[in-house]
Image (cartoon, grey):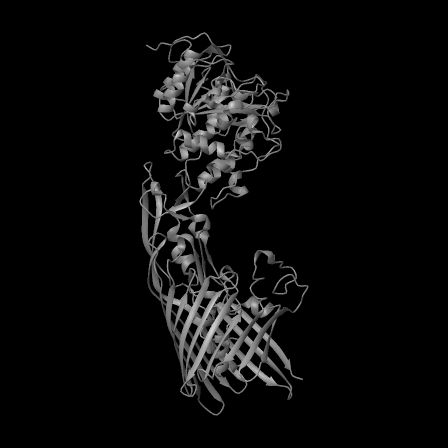
Amino acid sequence: MRTSLIILILLTSCGGGGGGGGGSSSSSSTTPTTSSWTSSVSTTEANVYKTTEYKAQWGLETINAAEAYALLAKNSKTVAGDGIKIAFIDSGVQTNHVEISGNYTSTGSYDYQNSDSDPSDDNGHGTHVASTAAGVKDSSGMHGVAYDATIIAEKVLNASGSGFSGNAANGITGAVTAGAKVINLSIGSSSDVGLYFKTALTTAKNSDVLSVAASGNDTALQPDYPAYYASDSSLAGYVLAVGALAYDGSIASYSSYCGDAKSYCLFAPGGSNDGDPAHAIYGAFMGSAYGTKNGTSMAAPHVAGAAAVIRGAWTFLTAPQVSQILLQTANSSFSGYDETIYGQGILDLEAAVQAQGQNTLGYGSSVSSGAGYDVATSSFASSAIFGDSFANNVAPQLSEAIFYDDFGRDYKAFLGDKITTNTGSTYDASYLMFNNVAYKSVPLSLGSRAQMHFNLASYKNEEAPNDLGLKYAVIDRSQDPQQQRNLNNGFSFTRNSSDFLPNSKFGFAFNFDEISAQQNQRQNFGKSGFILQNSFASNPYQSFLNQPSSSLENSRKFNQVFFDQSFLQKKMAARFSYQSSYDSNTKQNEVFDLGLSFKNISLDFGNLTEFQNNILNSRSLGAFESPSDVKTSYLKVSFDQKLTQNLHFLTSFSEGVSKIAGNSQGIFRQFDNVRSRSFSAALLWKNFGVNYFEPMRVYRGKVQFDIPVARDDAGNLTRYQGTASLAPKGREQDLEVFYLRDLSEVSQIKFSFLTQRQAGNVKSAPTNLIGIVSYKKMW
């Protein structure tokens, strides 16, 4: 038999009456708290939850509930408080009301007014409050914030809406015993409700239960009891006070302020006391009806429902963590905000379900270690050398990865969204067909031992909105400091130092690869007349940073210092270049190359070292990064054979082996046997030529990865390890044909045709067919 201690302090419900009118959508809006979660939802995804039931209660829209539901669903989380019990210390509930019955449990429910197990509502206040927090979603009427939560009814108020604090205290204790994780207290007294009541709240605290209390309808500077207990340091984080927001987004005319409880107080929709039912809170009424009420009693269940939503999604969270999340994500960015009035701001459920603080991709066995990379600053920009391998082979295997925020809440990391692929080929169709950038190479002699070389870029049409000269394709250059990668002037300075070392050169350059330029000059391969002549002339491991379609994600200006030493009547040359970023002192790469030339064959042996998380011109940051420099050893063979008087055969082959260190604390733990190559072959007959070219492509190699995919309530991480091929499914194949005809001694015309299959080594890339007619005249 249950007993109650009666203390002669009167408790009353904190709600006003209303008519049976329907609800309306709120005309006010709140600004979501900025979050670092890497995901968001579209309007379409949120609209799935904006049903007729949802729109019947404007408070849901005001707290951005639909967006919160969509975000949780996208993250494969419980959406609306399933598994969480909310206890209502109130006038009971109509247990057979359609908005109550589906979520109501008789286990733990009790009538402290009549000392029986039937908490039937004879006032209507408790039924409306319970429906606001946890009304059933059933395609009729309305639904609550946590529409899947379980309702426990502790009846402590009589038919007139009054009761005693002792009964309310016993109701709290009974709710704790019944397993409630959230207690709603839409009751209040202007006087202290006594030690017995506070002891009950302490009991709730000791069981990690969050109590949410209405601040009162007295327009007072301080909240009523028990909401005032939110200011008690011994209950900090376990009691929240809630004030009422009017329909227009301002404080309701009747609502008490947060006052001394401001650190643990916030506001939520409570309705406008202006006589318009559309401005009140719509909910369940007695007799299976619906109607509207105003009051802080209606505001508190919005917060109680929000707490249940969060605890349902992340069952390991403590009551203080849930309150801290609700408070720190409350919206305070509005005109007239005053902490003593609004506390921490207006409830924003969308912001509350967003990750807070660092998005940690843990590399250890538990969340408690706190070790890992921030997903928000992690990315991998894949170059065309890897083609579609990271998008097709790696990203799908990372789809289950999670990160956790400062509260340990786990979220899908959506790592696939962090991987981008440069689909442009060595010379993509758009660059060849619509190039609006004109380059002019200007040599300048500074005597017999010094030269300068200027590479000047300008727009052919200064009025064109972009570097392709396309009238309607406007590109915002402010988003790309490289000005769409092409408009980059450069120069070099070279000094012959024969006084010190015969046949040696050294110098420096800005945004111009002097070593590649010297290779083009040294060999005849660059004079073939092909558009793709660099497939013969330049070393792909030296020059890929200088290609016109270099990855936008990894484009960068650079400074270069270089040294060139020739031996054996210039049949052998040792070359060294070092490049650093123009924007900072960070290193980019260095190349050491040994070249041999014997009549019609040329060999290059070398080593490319890439710094600052560059991997074969791909850029890795954060959790994707490699902890040390990437070293690629390569061989290039070029061959030019005269087959007949007018027929020449040209071919070039490059092969490289890259050593890429794995990161024991990142995603990519080990790289194995990464090999790349390029190939070209051509025939030249008088003024006619045909060329087949396969740009540099990784053809072998794999990466081993390790990612967290789940966490349990104790904070232990479940990890998934796997292996993915780095060879792309795509293989770019370019075929070029040209015909050159002299029209006079000073003019000529050239016809070129180029077809590109699987451009950028992306299998799904469309085939490009390009025809170019060029006319040249000298004077």
Residue 48 higher or lower than 518, as above or below = above
Residue 502 x %, y %? 44, 85
Residue 559 x %, y %? 51, 67
Q: Quadrant of residue 171?
A: top left
Relative to 363, 577 lies left or right: right
Whether residue 132 can be seen here: no
Residue 609 higher or lower than 330, as above or below = below
Image mark count? 0
Residue 704 higher or lower than 315, as above or below = below
Q: Residue furthest bottom?
A: 645
Residue 483 x %, y %? 58, 62
Q: Quadrant of residue 256?
A: top right
Task: Tell which of 625 and 676 is nearer to you.
Answer: 625
Residue 501 x %, y %? 44, 82
Relative to 549, 708 lies left or right: left
Q: Residue furthest right?
A: 463
Relative to 277, 574 lies left or right: left
Task: Tell which of 151 and 609 is nearer to you.
Answer: 609
On-image quarter of the N terminus: top left
On-image quarter of the C terminus: bottom right
Task: Tell which of 341 and 427 is nearer to you.
Answer: 341
Whether residue 646 can be seen here: yes
Residue found 49% across the figure and 31% down from its top: 327
Q: Quadrant of residue 199?
A: top left
Residue found 67% across the figure and 65% down from its top: 462
